[in-house]
Amino acid sequence: MDKKLLDILACPVCKGELNYDKENNELICDKDKLAFPIRDDIPVMLESEARTLETK
Amino acid sequence: MTEASPQPFTKQQVRDSFNKAAETYDTFAIVQREVCKRLLERLDYIKVAPQMILDIGAGTGQGTQGLALQYPDAHIISMDIAENMLLKNRDKIQTQSTLAKKVKNFFKEKQMVQFVCADAEQLPFADASMDMIFSSLTIQWCPDLTKLFNEFRRVLKPGGLLMFTTLGTQTLHELRASWAEVSDKIHVNHFADMHDIGDALYNVQVENPVMDNETIVLNYQSIKQILIELKAVGAHNQNVGREKALTGKSRLQAMYKAYEKFRTEEGYPVTYDVLYGHAWNPKTPMQKTQSDSQQQHTSISLAQLKSTLGSRERS
């Protein structure tokens, strides 16, 4: 995941910062508990395509 | 004629439609190509040196490539709601030799062009992160223009530039009228009025918004070809009010017949009412209480705005 791109990417829902989960190749919004997939090196930043993370 | 278009179409439909059209898009996107070229040409007259550019609805990448050539030092985010379009876009950029020669070194080291799949109305970018938003023939798919432009303002840096094209009410009027004669359902997408777009720009308090329009008419030898090409560019009807069953053959024939009255020596005309707009994000930061209509924060009066709404015709 390119650092420069990660710096400007934000959660499309809350506009907050994202964390890159290297293991699953996803971008995580901790606040909304959403994981956005990266497919073919393209971040797919659609709420409809995001995986919902279980709340602990 | 006013059309009932409550909730016009879903974003998922738009996404599916363009994902399907990725293979055929370039072959048939004649108007789209011409309009994007003209929008790029307009940049020649605007003195800016953007570091970070967002191409919204980049599709197969004509705008992105043009921007990369025009601003070789800029970092460009090529964004579309349909991933398949972005895959085409990336392939083309990586193989296109003229562009590659010029920016080859940037690709690997600086990653000058990057691709992001997203919805224009829900931008996945940090506040004040872009120097320029470029968008050609995309925002006609976004029903809530005020929401859209607010989102644009949010991601633009203070002093940032918005350049866009979209489609106006007269677009596909021949097809709309022909369908209306034979069916009550919505067969042709509803397109915004230029003044509504001007009002939305005014509502979000951008500076010096300018809009103008131009009419492009394409002539076809058959009506069937018109329908084929609209589908091939993903621009066929997306409305939820459209007929679910296959349009009956007899009704289609009746529509063809109704279209005959538009026929000229040159063929069957298809009108594109192309709207061009640009505006600047104010240098002062955006105020959060934006929706409060009593708020006094105007740098331009409505009269001033209206006077900038020029109009010219070309065919």
Image: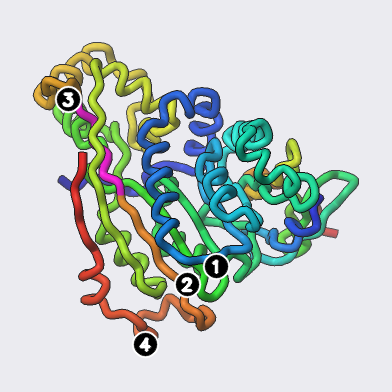
Residue B170: within the magenta?
A: no
Residue situated in front as seen by the camera: B19 or B183: B19
Question: In the drawing, what numbered circle is on residue B156?
Answer: 1
Tag 3–tag 2 contact (CB < 8 Å): no
Q: Secondary structure at mark 1?
A: strand
Residue at left 44%, top 46%? B138
Question: In the drawing, what numbered circle is on residue B146?
Answer: none
Note whether B192 is above or below B222 in the view shown. below
Tag 1–tag 4 contact (CB < 8 Å): no
Separation of residues labelled 4 and 2 (CA atoms): 17 Å
Question: In the drawing, what numbered circle is on residue B281?
Answer: 2
Identify residue for label 4: B296
Tag 1–tag 3 contact (CB < 8 Å): no
Q: Are marks 2 and 1 on the same chain?
A: yes
Separation of residues labelled 1 and 4 (CA atoms): 22 Å
Q: Secondary structure at mark 3?
A: helix
User: What residue range appears in magenta?
Assistant: B269-274
Q: Percent position (x, y) of residue B45? A: 40, 60
Q: Are marks 4 and 2 on the same chain?
A: yes
Note whether B151 is above or below B164 in the view shown. below
Q: Nearer the viewer, mark 3 or mark 2?
A: 2
